[in-house]
Image: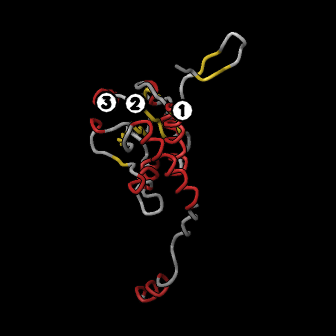
Amino acid sequence: MLWPRLARALIGKPLTDPAPPVPQDTVHALAERLAATARTRLGRSLAIREVDSGSCNGCELEVNALQNVAYDLERFGLRFVASPKHADVLLVTGPACRNMAEAMERALACTPEPRWVVAAGDCAVDGGVFKGSYAVHGGVGAVLPVDLLIPGCPPSPTQLLEGLLALLEAEARPPRKENRAGWIAPAGP
């Protein structure tokens, strides 16, 4: 009688390891800063369009984790959108596959200014494990102008939040220029 033994063995015992603890304070602080910076920079919340250009779906799992109850970006006004026409950020995962090059270029062309392109994951940065394949151009930078690289295989949701925050904070700072004495000062009026 295999079934009763199997049922007894499965009841009460988890078959997987428990999930690692999520530092709620860190997530909350990062998301608050990201939401405030997005509102300051754009005057509204940040809209993200995720584009999978041929990945193994490891990065997509982490991107989707940004929307679960642990991270919950919607509570901070950050959202994923279904069309690049409504997006501020193209978050690209996977290598730049030859079959997806035109689709990525079209998505970028549809995204209104100001826009940013973020390459998330090792495959999007330089081709990752797919580097050298006849079907891959390399990283996303071979097809699109990339504003931010987030390495990792896959990058954690916290790393993705930190990357988006760094992108917005870097874009919000005024350009710096050097004066005659060699000092670097923020550009002013």
Tell me which label, 1 or 3, sits earlier in the chain. 3
Residue drawn at point x = 47 percent, y = 45 percent:
36
Nearest the camera: 66 or 184?
A: 184
SS label for mark 2? loop
Q: Where does residue 139 sit, x and y in percent of width and height?
A: 47, 30
Label 3 sits on residue = 112
Q: Amino acid at mark 3?
A: Pro
Q: Is residue 126 visible?
A: no
Q: Write down the quadrant of residue 185 in the picture.
A: top right
Nearest the camera: 29 or 117?
A: 29
Residue drawn at point x = 55 percent, y = 54 percent:
29
Disc 3 vs disc 2: which is toward the camera?
Answer: 3
Q: Quadrant of the N terminus?
A: bottom left
Residue 4 to residue 83: above or below: below
Extreme residue toward the front, this view = 189
SS label for mark 1? helix
Residue 153 to residue 103: above or below: below
State yes or no: discs 1 and 3 in contact (Cβ < 8 Å): no
Q: Where does residue 189 sit, x and y in percent of width and height?
A: 52, 19
Q: Where does residue 90 sit, x and y in percent of width and height?
A: 38, 36
Residue drawn at point x = 31 percent, y = 31 percent:
111
Q: Where does residue 24 sit, x and y in percent of width and height?
A: 55, 61
Tell me which label, 2 or 1, sits earlier in the chain. 2
Q: Which mark is residue 135?
A: 2
Neighbourhood count class around disc 3 (C-alpha, 10 Å): few under 14, some 14–19, many 20 upward: some
State yes or no: discs 2 and 1 in contact (Cβ < 8 Å): no
Q: Amino acid at mark 1?
A: Ala
Q: Which mark is residue 170?
A: 1
Q: Marks 2 and 1, how far apart in space?
A: 34 Å
Q: Amino acid at mark 2?
A: Ala
